[in-house]
Amino acid sequence: MAIEVRIPTILRSYTGGDKAVDGKGETLDDLFADLDARHEGLRGRLVSDDGALNRFVNVYLNDEDVRFLGGIATPLNDGDVVTILPAVAGG
Amino acid sequence: MLELRRDLYDAIVAHARRDHPDEACGVIAGPAGTDRPERFIEMANAERSPTFYRFDSMEQFQVWKEMDARDEEPVVIYHSHTATEAYPSRTDISLASEPGAHYVLVSTRAEETVEFRSFRIVEGEVTEEEIAVI
């Protein structure tokens, strides 16, 4: 099951500069574990210590923000596109 | 150094004044690799707050996709401080995620004068830079 994952500039140090990588998984959580096996450290930037999605990382499944789907447990299908964008935020 | 057209400078200030006392935020996109801010994009502050800002996640997704399709980058990311100086806060520094961008800070704390400054924020390190309004 191949899922295309689009990587933002700031996280491309984990992917050898690649803008997109392929991964697999039944859920977003599985996908991040799969990516971490080949791009060590990436998962730690996306998921906080309590296992939830990092509050300041936006993850989109196709055209939806996964926060409005199932968060980290959102189910995935072959051919899905996952886009990661760091939130633009501050005080 | 940030080179910024006068109309874009004015557009940032006008947006910051209009949203005061809430923080205003947005992007100026430019052709990838040129470091030239050209296309002004006002963003909604999803927090609608005088002390915090965050791009609306769906609006950010649309704008980032559009930049990608046009081969553009976020050359400038701007936001306002409405009661404090135009200098990156601790939160600004810890959340800065576009190492190639010029982070423009505007303060609207004074009614008559505007503070307008630009910074690079890379891996927690803040470097102020000159601004040339052209």
Image (tube, coloured by chain):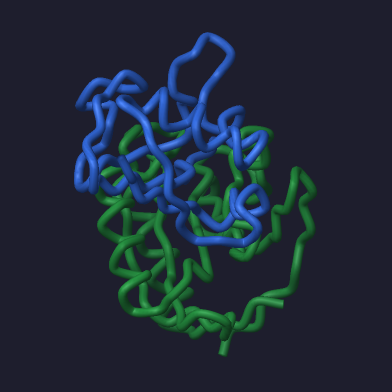
Q: Which corner quadrant of the image does residue B12 belong to?
A: bottom left
Percent across and percent down for residue B18 are 32, 54
Q: Position of residue B80 (x, y in %)?
A: 49, 49
Q: Quadrant of residue B93?
A: top right
- What residue sits 37% from the left and 77% below the top? B39
Colour displayed for chain A in the image of the structure: blue
- Residue A38 horizontal/vertical position (percent): 60, 41
Relative to A76, residue B9 above or below? below
Determine if residue B51 is in view: no
Q: Quadrant of the C terminus of chain A?
A: top right
Most foreground residue, B26 or B24: B26
Position of the N terminus of chain A, as image quadrant, is top left
- The residue that appears at 32% across and 25% down in the rendered structure is A27
Give left or right: position of B13 versus B119.
Answer: left
Q: Which chain is green?
A: B
- Whether residue B101 sits left or right of residue B66 in the image: it is right
